[in-house]
Image (tube, rainbow, N blue to C red):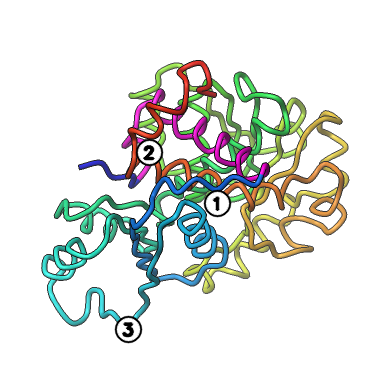
């Protein structure tokens, strides 16, 4: 059974197929066409963490594809009222797939271990694959492609940074993380990328102004993620010189685009002047969450449609 717990679960040609499907569906939606590719299919949204983009984009995307979704919060008792085996296998009797937004990556791994239905990682502490696919779709649209493009992530080497780094390795891009000492990406994660994609171009550069000198896209995220609130003061001090502001943008090429996965703490990791500038793709990037996930859902639940409708030369 196919799951998407991280982008390590798919091959490069599969990622290209998903992105091509996403772009095709986005173009058809803009033309007023909403094909019922997943008619009468149902997905569950099993969330341990609050969400705006992940929940609404999956729910809306499924509706546009002719299917439906169910939001499952604390009331269903996941991990509390019954064994993980019983919970997961019963859920698999009702739905075609589950999107899990979990506090720990081990939770989505446990769900997938029973093979009761396809499991999609909607966010964990380790990675955020749906976000990374939306990010690459945005880069492709804004910069006319992604091959050899350079994404510079200014901030914490967190779950988003790790997913984007893996995605760039898969697609022949370059990735630079600029962060203070102690906030780099997980070494085991980087070792997995290097083992699978030995030509990956991933580096860490401490000086953000040096890091962005050849950037095509400058990406940032909050300095303190959910669950790290006790570290807020220490993180604010550590990342003080890593703000994406007008001075930093002046050190980058004039064509560089600005990315942020949101929600943003305006005035902290990014200034209003930058996030609201003409260089910002932040709102388009958020919108692309839905389009990227629609491509993923079709790939998981109706691959024949892709075989019949997406030509090999459309893969991006």
Give SS at disc 1. Answer: helix
Marking on residue 299: 2
- Left or right: residue 214 versus residue 89 is right
The quadrant in which residue 205 appears is top right
Work out whether residue 158 or residue 118 is closer to the camera in this orientation and state it: 118
Work out whether residue 268 or residue 255 is closer to the camera in this orientation and state it: 255
Mark 3 to mark 2 CA distance (whole Å) = 30 Å
Give the mark nearer the N terminus: 3 vs 2: 3
Q: How many callouts does the rendering have?
A: 3
Work out whether residue 28 or residue 136 is closer to the camera in this orientation and state it: 28
Residue at 30 percent across and 55 percent down: it is 97
Residue at 51 percent across and 16 percent down: it is 313
Give SS at disc 2. Answer: helix
Give the mark nearer the N terminus: 2 vs 1: 1
Mark 2 to mark 1 CA distance (whole Å) = 14 Å
* Main SS category, magenta section: helix
Q: Position of residue 235 (x, y in %)?
A: 61, 62
Frontmost of labels 3 and 1 is: 1
Q: Position of residue 257 (x, y in %)?
A: 76, 37
Residue at 66 percent across and 49 percent down: it is 220
Q: Position of residue 225 (x, y in %)?
A: 54, 63
Give the mark nearer the N terminus: 3 vs 1: 3
- Left or right: residue 276 versus residue 201 is right
**Quick check: 188 above or below 286?**
above
Give SS at disc 3. Answer: helix
Per the rendered image, the range of residues in magenta is 6-31
Marking on residue 290: 1
**Quick check: 165 above or below 226?**
above
Q: Position of residue 71 (x, y in %)?
A: 40, 71
The quadrant in which residue 262 appears is bottom right
Q: Residues within 10 Å of mark 2 (few under 14, many from 20)?
A: many
Q: Which residue is disc 3 drawn over?
A: 75
């Amino acid at each position: 059974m196919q799951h998407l717990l991280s982008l390590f679960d798919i091959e490069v040609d599969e990622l290209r197929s998903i992105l091509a499907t996403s772009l095709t569906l986005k173009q058809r939606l803009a033309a007023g066409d909403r094909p019922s590719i997943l008619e009468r299919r149902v997905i569950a949204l099993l969330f341990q963490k609050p969400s705006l983009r992940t929940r609404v984009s999956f729910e809306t995307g499924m509706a546009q594809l002719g299917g439906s979704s169910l939001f499952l919060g604390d009331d269903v008792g996941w991990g509390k009222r019954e064994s993980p085996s019983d919970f997961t296998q019963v859920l698999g009797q009702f739905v075609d797939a589950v999107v899990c937004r979990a506090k720990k990556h081990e939770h989505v791994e446990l769900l997938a271990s029973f093979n009761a239905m396809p499991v999609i990682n909607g966010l964990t502490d380790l990675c955020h694959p749906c976000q990374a696919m939306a990010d690459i779709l945005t880069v492709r649209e804004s910069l006319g492609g992604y091959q050899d493009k350079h994404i510079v992530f200014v901030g914490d080497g967190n779950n988003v940074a790790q997913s984007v780094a893996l995605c760039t390795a898969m697609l022949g891009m370059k990735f630079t993380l600029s962060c203070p000492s102690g906030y780099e990406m997980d070494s085991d994660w980087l070792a997995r990328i290097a083992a699978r994609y030995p030509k990956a171009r991933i580096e860490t550069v401490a000086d953000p102004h040096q890091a962005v000198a050849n950037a095509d896209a400058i990406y940032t995220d909050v300095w303190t993620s959910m669950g790290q609130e006790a570290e807020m003061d220490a993180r604010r001090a550590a990342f003080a010189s890593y703000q994406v502001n007008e001075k930093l943008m002046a050190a980058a090429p004039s064509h560089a685009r600005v990315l942020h996965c949101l929600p943003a703490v305006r005035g902290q990791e990014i200034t209003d002047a930058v996030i609201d500038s003409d260089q910002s793709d932040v709102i388009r990037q958020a919108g692309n969450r839905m389009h990227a996930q629609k491509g993923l859902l079709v790939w998981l639940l109706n691959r024949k449609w892709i075989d019949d409708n997406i030509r090999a030369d459309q893969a991006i």
